Image: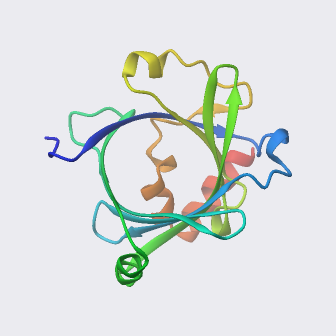
Amino acid sequence: MAHKYAQFELERRWLLATLPEVLQDSQNFQLIEDRYIIGTPLRLRCMTNAQGEVTARKFTQKYQSANQTAYATTITNFYLDEASYALLATLPAKILVKRRYKLRDGRFQFSIDQFQGLLTGLVLAEIEQPDLTSLHAIPTPSFALREVTEDLRFTGGELAGLGIDQRQQLLAEISN
């Protein structure tokens, strides 16, 4: 059941072998630090530009109800000031850091996430659409290896929660 302020997010994700060449030297990215609050469907996000300036702080509830497919989640965002963010950042969380680039492929604009830290080497592309028909009509981008939308391991919350052995196994699997 959707709550009053919740929205549906419809997206697809693809695994990439590497950051597309056109983005290799790009300084046009957002650095995203996601803090997945342990034991909850809550995420605290801080976004900074390549110059280190904070562009957004968000507190998000994101979940998938039993009747939603892997392509749909329910999401509610709250934008925060610095003090509210600092207070919430004290909660125990699993942290995920990535650089997010924008890339146009034909008539579609993709977000390209290059993961940092313990997930260095993982690169995903994602795209959102307003409805499932237009979402499924998007062809696999030319720079993608394979679609991973239905593989829950490639969702942010799951990636943040991977143990060391699971991370190593996932990175070994995608490098083959």
Q: As rendered, which of 28 and 126 lies closer to the eye?
A: 28
Q: As rendered, which of 174 and 14 lies closer to the eye?
A: 14
Q: Is residue 118 above or below residue 115?
A: below
Lateral position of residue 84 relative to residue 121, left or right: left
Image quadrant where residue 134 sits: top left
Residue 166 at what x, y percent from top left? 55, 61
Image quadrant where residue 47 sits: bottom right
Instruction: Give the number of marks.
Output: 0
Q: Is residue 75 above or below residue 70?
A: below
Q: As rendered, which of 106 and 123 lies closer to the eye?
A: 106
Protein image colouring? rainbow
Q: Residue at x 67, y 70 (%)?
A: 52
Residue 90 at what x, y percent from top left? 38, 84
Q: Quadrant of the N terminus?
A: top left
Q: Residue at x 41, y 82 (%)?
A: 86
Residue 135 at what x, y percent from top left? 46, 22
Q: Is residue 130 above or below residue 90?
A: above
Lateral position of residue 16 relative to residue 42, left or right: right
Q: Quadrant of the C terminus?
A: top right
Residue 140 at what x, y percent from top left? 62, 23
Q: Residue at x 15, y 46 (%)?
A: 3
Q: Residue at x 80, y 45 (%)?
A: 23
Image quadrant where residue 78 sits: bottom left
